[in-house]
Image: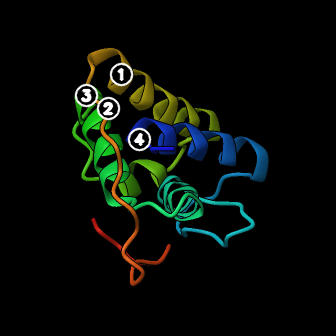
Amino acid sequence: METTVADVLEKAAERLEAKGWVQCMDGPEDGPNCARGAIAWEALAMNREWSQAGDALHEYLCRGGSWNGVVSYNDEPGREKEQVIDALKGAAKDLRNDGNDTVLPVRNRIQTANSNPY
């Protein structure tokens, strides 16, 4: 089965709902995680590269404001878990609705959850 960018973003949102959300760290495999950590762990669980999913969330966030990246959005003082989950779900929905969802390549064995493509 092919895995798309939207699939990873949706799974990352589900991860935050189930395992919790944090700021200022990616978080461990068993959670809690920040947005970037959730994206990375879910993509890796599906044996997929994760930087494209992070890029898609960044592009979505830039439409609503001038964020420097996923990390700065996640770690903004006053940010709430629900806002991050909504952003992940919103980015996935937009990709599917716009017809811009793409299949993610199989993961390079060197890439880990702590690899920072941003």
* Disc 2 crowd, CA 10 A, few/some/many (<14, 14-19, 20+): some
Amino acid type for the residue under numbered disc 4: Thr
Q: Mark 3 and mark 1: span between their CA atoms?
A: 8 Å
- Residue located beneath label 1 in the image: 94
Judging depth in this view, the residue of 46 and 61 nearest the camera is: 46
Element on which disc 1 rests: helix
- Residue located beneath label 3 in the image: 100
Mark closest to the chain's N terminus, 4 or 3: 4
Q: Is residue 53 above or below residue 86?
A: below
Identify the residue at image location x=39%, y=42%: 5
Q: Residue 100 occupies which quadrant of the picture?
A: top left
Q: Mark 3 and mark 2: span between their CA atoms?
A: 4 Å
Q: Mark 4 and mark 2: span between their CA atoms?
A: 6 Å
Q: Are marks 3 and 1 in contact (CB under 8 Å)?
A: yes
Mark closest to the chain's N terminus, 4 or 2: 4
Identify the residue at image location x=67%, y=47%: 16
Identify the residue at image location x=35%, y=22%: 94
Q: Mark 1 and mark 4: span between their CA atoms?
A: 13 Å
Residue lying furthest bottom: 110
* Disc 3 crowd, CA 10 A, few/some/many (<14, 14-19, 20+): few
Amino acid type for the residue under numbered disc 3: Asn
- Residue located beneath label 2 in the image: 101
Q: Are marks 3 and 2 in contact (CB under 8 Å)?
A: yes
Q: Are marks 4 and 2 in contact (CB under 8 Å)?
A: yes
Amino acid type for the residue under numbered disc 1: Asp
Q: Work out which quarter of the rendered image holds the C terminus and state it.
A: bottom left
Identify the residue at image location x=76%, y=53%: 19
Amino acid type for the residue under numbered disc 2: Asp
- Circle number at residue 4: 4
Element on which disc 3 rests: loop
Query: Which mark lies nearer to you, 1 or 2?
Result: 2
Q: Mark 1 and mark 2: span between their CA atoms?
A: 9 Å
